Amino acid sequence: MARPAHPHAMQPSRPGSTRTAPPQMPPRYPMGGRYRNYTLFDATGLVYLLVGFVALRIVWALGSGREAWQSMLNQLENPLYIAFHVLAFVSVVFVAVRFFSLFPKAQPPRIGPAKPPPAPVITAMLYGVWFGITAVMTFVLIGGNL
Amino acid sequence: MSERQKKTFVITRFDPDTDEVPKTESYEIEVEPYWKILDAINYIKDEVDPSLSHRWSCRMAVCGSCGMMVNGEPRLTCKDRLSGYGDTIEISPLSNFPVIRDLVVEMDGFMDKFNQVKPWIIRAKELAAEDGPMRQSPEELEEFKQFSMCINCMLCYSACPVVANEPEFLGPAAIALGHRYNIDSRDEGAAERNEVFRGEGTVFSCSYANECSEVCPKNVDPAAAVNQAKFNAVIDWATGLVISRDGKE
């Protein structure tokens, strides 16, 4: 059953002479069919907000001395924290894949005299940069020197 | 030759003179295997219930009149074969639009949005007739041709979650049409339209659900147009900070 849309959705600027039934939202919105991916894409914003809070907490612990830092590291081994980070990782991958698939067609046909490269090249560039940065970050985090 | 088959159509009805809210009515009819959904609705109108109201015209996916919700999805009913659906098919008026009667929606709000984007070629100075036609290369035509294929069927508005929630939003088809003129090599009105794009019905309301492109029966890809328009509107705004609109610093 569809929910009501905004009562002024698609209303004419001058009201017509006939009484109308109010507009209804698409019946499958927000979690049915293709809308599910869109809604989940937006919902990952909550995960990133929580990741931000965790990052602030980690920085706070780092500035509060060795004991606080060690305590923070111990807390991060808690299964709940690990599950949260798995969720954050899945969210990042999901958003990246959806964004990378939609990004190429959002490029205008030309910017001044310059034309963007073909869509497959843009997609390849996006994935290339993503994997490249991930590889460098992983290398640094496991203790490698650049 | 396949045989006729029985199908049930659950159709939303609304009479503004007698009904407080829309209701549904079921019609069981025998359909031919080659029928489109519109053929079945026309049959119900002609043979079963003449009080049913719906819009249609060309029957070949050109006029854009027969858009309706079919099993909850915006579809052009003259384009969809009945054989692709089950025994029961739900037909309702396009979502996100006020309903005038049965399957007929109020289109004036849609036309208002179209007018806002100035969908015509704007020239700073008209060319004199003796200068001959303004030429355009096939490459220049190709840049906007896809966006000019819109048949104004309004399916994209019916699928858009932003249209459902933000009445000011210009919406997919209107922005696609404005963008089509902005990137037309003959046009010089991009600055005017970009002001509209950054105004009350801003293109930046679009959250790129991409539903408009998924349901578009003519592969116009309005989501691409809207997001290209966002990009151009930002470039235009940044350029306007440095260069005044009359070309002087």
Image: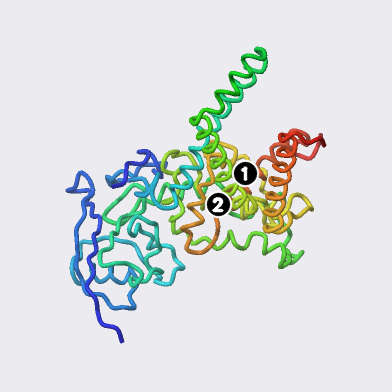
* Horizontal relation, residue A137 to residue A79: left or right: right
Residue B51 % position (x, y): 20, 62
- Disc 1 crowd rating (10 Å Cα; few below 14, some 14-19, many 20+) is many
Which chain is mark 2 on? B
Left or right: residue B187 compared with residue B227: right
Residue pictured at 67% horizontal, 64% vertical: B142
Question: Of helix, strand and loop, which one carries label 1?
Answer: helix
Residue bearing mark 1: B230
The foreground one among B47 and B27 is: B27
- The amino acid marked with disc number 1 is Lys
Q: Which residue is mark 2?
A: B223
Q: Position of residue B32 (x, y in %)?
A: 28, 78
Element type where label 2 sits in the image: helix
Q: Given contact means CB atoms under 8 Å apart, are the residues at marks 1 and 2 in contact?
A: no
Q: Residues within 10 Å of mark 2 (few under 14, many from 20)?
A: many
Query: Can you give x and y, in whole percent of width and height, for residue A24 in the image?
Result: 33, 45
Q: Say which quarter of the image contains residue B38.
A: bottom left
Up-down relation of residue A91 to residue B224 (above or below): above
Q: Quadrant of residue B71?
A: bottom left
* B221 is higher (above) or lower (below) than B207: below
Q: Residue at x 61, y 25 (%)?
A: A55
Closer to the camera, A97 or A59?
A59
**The furthest residue to the bottom:** B1
Q: Is residue B215 left or right of residue B86?
A: right
